[in-house]
Image (spheres, rainbow, N blue to C red):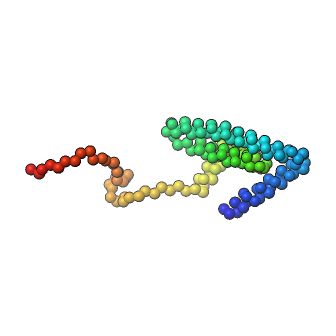
Amino acid sequence: MLFYLFVLFTVVPIVELALLIWIGAHTHWWVPVLIVVATAMLGAALARWQGFQVMRRIQDEMRAGRVPTDALIDGAMILVAGVLLVTPGVLTDVTGIVLLIPPLRHLVKQGLKAWFKRHVRVQTVGFGDSSAGSSDQGDRIIDAQVIETRVEDAP
């Protein structure tokens, strides 16, 4: 994990800076500046627009009584895309644009789902004494409230 963080915070910015310098050396000095500013503005606008669409999808699925897993994954990917597009650089911009194009985002989402299925294990744990209950579901707790109490004389 430490290696990946090292690559993310040191190698990627150095490569991004080298690419921007290379673009500036082969064109005019203002071209890399324009690329950085334009992709930041365009990326923020696109991420906001698609973010609102995903929020609507999440609300619709929740109203229908479904868990909005795909919409939540799309929302997370759009958030990452927005951060990548606002970050100066060419590689981060390309990655952010890929995450904002719905068919390409779908491919990335399928890859992420496959990775999670291979690397993440979900386990549920139940508490209580399983030998006490006779049913397979275990003991059922029913909430109750005392409405009235009275003492009756014994016959």
- The answer to which of 43 and 1 lies nearer the viewer is 43
* Left or right placement of residue 86 versus residue 119 in this view: right
Residue at the left extreme, as displayed: 155
Q: Residue at position x 70%, y 63% from top?
A: 3
- The answer to which of 66 and 133 lies nearer the viewer is 66
Across the whole image, how many numbered discs are drawn on residues? 0
> Which x, y percent locates residue 123?
50, 56
Q: Quadrant of residue 134?
A: bottom left
Residue 95 visible in image: no
> Which x, y percent locates residue 90?
79, 48
Q: Where 108 falls versus 120 (above or below)?
A: above
* Left or right placement of residue 17 versus residue 7 in this view: right
Residue at the bottom extreme, as displayed: 2
Residue 21 visible in image: yes
Q: Residue at position x 66%, y 62% from top?
A: 1
Q: Residue at position x 90%, y 45% from top?
A: 28
- The answer to which of 104 and 65 lies nearer the viewer is 65
> Which x, y percent locates residue 51?
64, 40
> Which x, y percent locates residue 148?
24, 45
Q: Residue at position x 36%, y 59% from top?
A: 129
